[in-house]
Amino acid sequence: MPDQAPRAGLSAAILLAAGAGVRTGHETPKQVRTLAGKPVVAHALDALRAHPGVGPVALVVMPGSEDAMRSLLGHRAESLAIVAGGSSRRLSVLAGLEALARSEPGAAHVLVHDSARPLLPVAVIDRLLKALVDGARCVVPVLPVVDTLVRSGGDEAGQVVDRSTLARVQTPQGFDFAALMAAHQHWSGPEPTDDAQMLRRAGIDVALVPGDSALEKITGPGDHERMERILTVGMSTRVGMGFDVHRLMEGEDLWLCGVQVPHSHGLSGHSDADVAIHALVDAMLGALAEGDIGSHFPPSDPQWKGAASDRFLAFACDRVLARGGQIEHVDVTIICEAPKIGPHRGTMRARLAEIMMLQEARISVKATTTERLGLTGRGEGIAAQAVVTLRLPDDDAEAAS
């Protein structure tokens, strides 16, 4: 029988992303590197926020990187507490606890998780929250030690260690909020590497629940690439194409790729008529085989009158995530005689990257003309086409499992 998850909002969560990640051998901190189409930190963040038993999340980052993290996460950063960490793991957890105490003073429980463990199964969260609801004040997911263990130095080098009483500790770990706060506020001595040991020293029992092999940590060279391979097993490539055209009219603002472009005319439509984003949304929905932009945002619905098209694009991105997919690449072509797109291309790429939470390297924006032929050649309108490449879980593989 599956674990029964408690009701929504019972537990707050702290997601730690304040480390430098130097052991990976990569210059970029591991929590912000792209993994299967999105930042490493976004994987665990999405899992925590999607769980009905988890309420507010505090994301703890390197001091001075708060704005950069908000930009990286895009709309994921909305209503998310992003706080600066400390010089040690303990001080970073304490910063997260204090941020949650200010925003959620009544939180009963808290989960503490390392963003370097991006694959966070729902079942592990279920088990932790159930143990807390059942009365545990400190609960830790563990895995059995299956390898033979030996001592590595001294006169006892090579001597086998009894592994039957040992277990591998993982995160997230679950705690009574007040107990963990007290343990951090009153801690003295060497810096601990594990919150559960702080509560154990305070006389609180540590409960153990089964962990999951998916919760491996990105630590050393090659771990990132190994995790990428795990995430792409059982995935298939889908390609979608979109096309849209809108009439140019005086008195309208011109929006292209989420950027307002100065011009004598703007595009006419029910929303802001961002022809490039509309083509892009259609391409994404096409790759998902989920209809087109009009079926989700019909022009007959007054709520979309004058709406910013970035809302449509964010929706399409969320649909990809809901299907367990990844956006691999985006290619947008704007077709017009004027205005010139070149001076705005960098800004357009940056804006699309922000909305879609992608690296700019995965986004192409370019322009062409029709050599003064047709409605775009006569300056009557602007057209756009887009091609999107997605990776989605393979239906046949899922059915076979």
Image: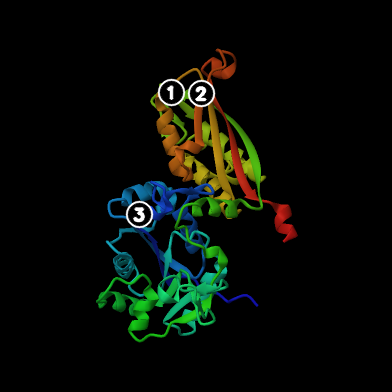
Residue for badge 2: 367
Mark 2 and mark 1 in contact (Cβ < 8 Å)? yes
Kindly report which numbered mark, 3 or 2, lies closer to the viewer in this rendering.
3
In the current view of this chain or complex, which residue is farthest to the top? Answer: 372
Q: Going 60% across and 51% down the picture, which residue do you hit?
A: 232
Colouring used for the render: rainbow
Residue 122 appears in which quarter of the rendering?
bottom right
Give the residue type at disc 1: Gly
3D distance between C-alphas at marks 1 and 2: 8 Å
Q: Position of residue 380 (x, y in %)?
A: 53, 19
Residue for badge 3: 20
Q: Is 364 placed above or below 193 here? A: above
Residue for badge 1: 342
3D distance between C-alphas at marks 3 and 1: 37 Å
Residue 198 appears in which quarter of the rendering?
bottom left
Does residue 111 show up? Answer: yes
